[in-house]
Structure formats: C-alpha cells, structure tokens
Image (tube, rainbow, N blue to C red):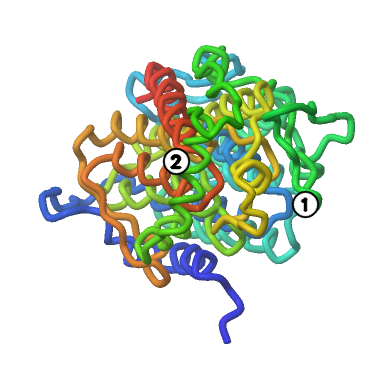
Amino acid sequence: MNRFSPAQRFVQSFIGLFVSSLLIGSCQDHPSPTPLAMPADVAHAWIQMHIRLTLSTTGYNSVVSDRSFGYAGITMYEAVLPGIDDGTSLLAQIGGSSVAPGKSADQYYWPESLNAAMASLTRQFFETTSAANMKSIDSLETVYKNKFQAATSPDKLTNAETYGRQVADAIFAWSKTDGGHQAYKNLTDPTYTPPVGPGLWVPTPTAAPILPRWGNNRTFVANSAVSSQPGPPLAYSEDPGSAFYAMANEVYMTSQSLTRTDTTTARFWADTPGNLNVPAHATNILTQLLVTTNQDLFKAAAAYARHGIALSDAAVSTFQTKYTYTLLRPFSYIRTVLKKLTWTPLLPTPPHPEYSAAHAVVSAASAAVLEKLFGSNYRFSDNSYASSYGIRSYTSFQAYAQEAGRSRLLGGIHYGPSISAGLTQGANVGHLVNQLTIK
C-alpha cells in the first residue's frame, strides 16, 4: 500500500520526471513550445521541492506557506537578475537591500546562481523539517550543480554559487523583520483573547486561534493590506427576515443539496491534510502554465516572484480583516440560531474568524497575476489532483478564482458575501502587485 497521499506522490513524480509529468495544462489553441537556451527546469524543481516541504513540515499551514512562497520567488528573481537585460531589482522596489555581483554578468552561470540561492534559502526557511527532507534538499542542489558542470566553466559555476548564496542570506536576514519569522514554531498566541459578544467568532474547543496578529505583518508592496481592506461584513442579526440570517441559511440549504460535483469541487480546493495547501495549489498551477508555455529561466523566476508576492500580501490582507471584525463562522450560527444542533460542514472549520474568505482572497490575487502573465481569457487545465479528482479546466483565471472561492460555500465554512468580498479584496492586492516592475 502506498503510504503517500495523491498530492505527495504528484510532487515526488514532478521532481523526478519533470517535464513529462506536466505536459497537461494547455488547450489546443496554445502554441507548441520551442527549445530554450536557458531552460527553467531548475526553478520549477525548487518550487516543487518547496511545495513538498509545505506538505511535510510541521507548522507550514496555508498562511505561513503564503509567506514562504513570496520569499522563494523573490530569491529566484534576485539570484538571476544581473543576467536579465535591463532588469530592475525587485528588492529595491519593496524595501529590501539588493546584492550587487562583483563581476560582469558574463562571468556567472545563472541557473547555478538560482540553484545555490534556493538551496540556501530553503534550508533556512525549513530549518525544522525532517532529516529526510534536508537530505532531499542537499540532493536536489547536487543534482543540478553536477548537471551544470558540463554546461559552463568552473569559475563561472563558483562565481554563481557564491552570488546565489549571498542573495539568499540577504533575503533571509530581511525576512526576519517582517513579523512572520518562525511562525511555524507556534501558530497560536497565548496573549490573544478573542472578543466576546453577539455575532463574534467562537473558536472551536479543540483549536486555539491561529496567527491572530498576522495582519500586522509587513507586506511586500507597501500598504497593500491596508489599501485592499473590504470594509465591514453584513450587520449581525438573528432576525429570520435579516440579510445575515439569509446568508447563513444559504450555507445550510446548500449543504443539504450538494451534488457529487459540488462535493468534488469542495474537496478539490480543500487545503486539508493530504491535499496541497492553498498557496501550494496556486503555485502548482503557475508551474504547469510555465512548463506548458516553455518559459525560460528568467521569465519563470520573474513569474514566481510576482505570484509569490501576491500570495503573501493577500494572506496579510485577509488576516487583517479577519481579526478586525472577528465574525462568527457558519458552524456557530447554524447550530445556535438556526437550531440545527447536529449540523456539520463538509470541510473542517478553520481556527480563525470567518470574514473575509481567505481562499477567495488568495485565489483572486493569484488570478490577477496570472492574467498579467498569460492574458485575461487564457484557457487552461489543472491536473494537481488528476488521480483523485480528475483534470479540471477553466476558460479564464477569473473562473478559477471564482470556483476556488465558491468551494468554501460548498464546504460549509464561509458565507457567500464573505467570498464575494474576498474575491474583490484579492483582486485589489493582485493589481497592486502587478504594478511592480519585474521583467
């Protein structure tokens, strides 16, 4: 019996058989890939390693992982930046300090710079992961370094490796000051006490509130969390004629008439154990698109940077909203007000307030960036769970975000208006990220 989940098996096969495992994402109208002088496989392999580590490292829930994908993307981009014609430092735009190479760009082999940078950053970000995972990090770095030895001179390889590590160390040092450093060690805060009152969130008895101060973290785009706030949720009411009652009743009535397709949709987007978490799934979609369209190393690094920043800033934005309004979950309202005393949602209720819907926020931010990269009406497919839920196809990135958001209503853990507000909130974050100059 295979002891790995479908998601874990997917990631492992992706790393081992990279291109052949991902020739899935385009529809018939996309052009065939052409050979590249500097392919992006090393970037994709490190992202898949990152995904694998978020699956198997304690404390790397969706929120903490959003942050790590942000720093991973920035590291990739800065590690190859000097090799990009007319490239602009991303760190200079978002408040970090860039690292200047000591030699001319032609004295470096940029794939090895990215390889060394990601190996260094990954070890530091996932310091508490298992010994087996650490060995896998070492192995991946070695595999690519050995591969590159046949492609360039020893001096260029050494220069690139040194520069990549300098970039990673500088970015990791900067990451320590954003408010989220080592959050994976303790997701709860014993100094936080949820407010009490009508309509306010009631934590479940078995799960303490997680990351109540995450909304105070520094964002990559200055003030993106503040400027994307959606305003307050619907006014709380227990009156059967109220809008609040109606939106809670919608969750209940939906749960009573779920089709097989509805259930599959909810579980496809669930970030429960055994599945990819929210940012891992979104990033896996990006990888599929980059592989299908055969983007080169520089384009892939730029894409991972922009997308990772959007995921991270979206998480800060939605958690700022959540712990500002601390709105109660459908679970509490349906049981106490609708008197459905034994009602249980299809998906587990997360240990943080309801409004806004985080999955909608993060997915909409992702979709906004993907639109910038590939176009607003780009048709694509996602095979992240092909073996368990089948391949899902979309006519646009907005369709992907809307389905991901609605999955939370189908799962019984979010109200419809919270999803709608979250989609707008995430799109606003994504639009701010899209204003960054990243080539």
Q: Disc 1 residue type? A: Thr
Q: Position of residue 304 (x, y in %)?
A: 44, 38
Taking the spot 35% from the left edge, 25% from the top edge, the residue there is 439
Mark 2 or 1, which is nearer the eye? 1
Name the quadrant of the N terminus.
Answer: bottom right
Q: Answer with left or right where residue 98 lies relative to residue 19.
A: right
The residue singled out by tag 1 in the image is 128
What residue does disc 2 label?
109
**What is the quadrant of residue 385 in the picture?**
bottom left
The image quarter in which residue 301 lies: top left
Query: Please, which residue is most extreme toward the bottom here?
Result: 1
Residue at 31% over, 48% down: 289
Q: Earlier in the sequence, mark 2 or mark 1?
A: 2
| Alpha-carbon span between mark 2 and mark 1 | 31 Å
Q: Residue at x 43, y 41 (%)?
A: 405
Residue 105 percent location from the top left of the image: 43, 28
Q: Please state which of residues 128 and 219 is positioned toward the viewer in this rendering.
A: 219
Name which residue type carries label 2.
Tyr
Q: Considering only vertical position in the picture, is 210 above or below 24?
A: above
| Secondary element at image label 1 | loop
Residue 148 in view of the camera: no
Under tag 2, what secondary structure? loop
**Residue depicted at x 58% and y 73%:** 4
Left or right of 16? Residue 339 is right
Residue 13, percent across and down?
46, 69
In this view, the residue farthest toward the left is 29
Q: Quadrant of residue 372?
A: top left
Q: Which disc number belongs to residue 202?
A: none
Closer to the camera, 85 or 45? 45
| Residue that lies at the very extreme toward the right in this rendered image | 191
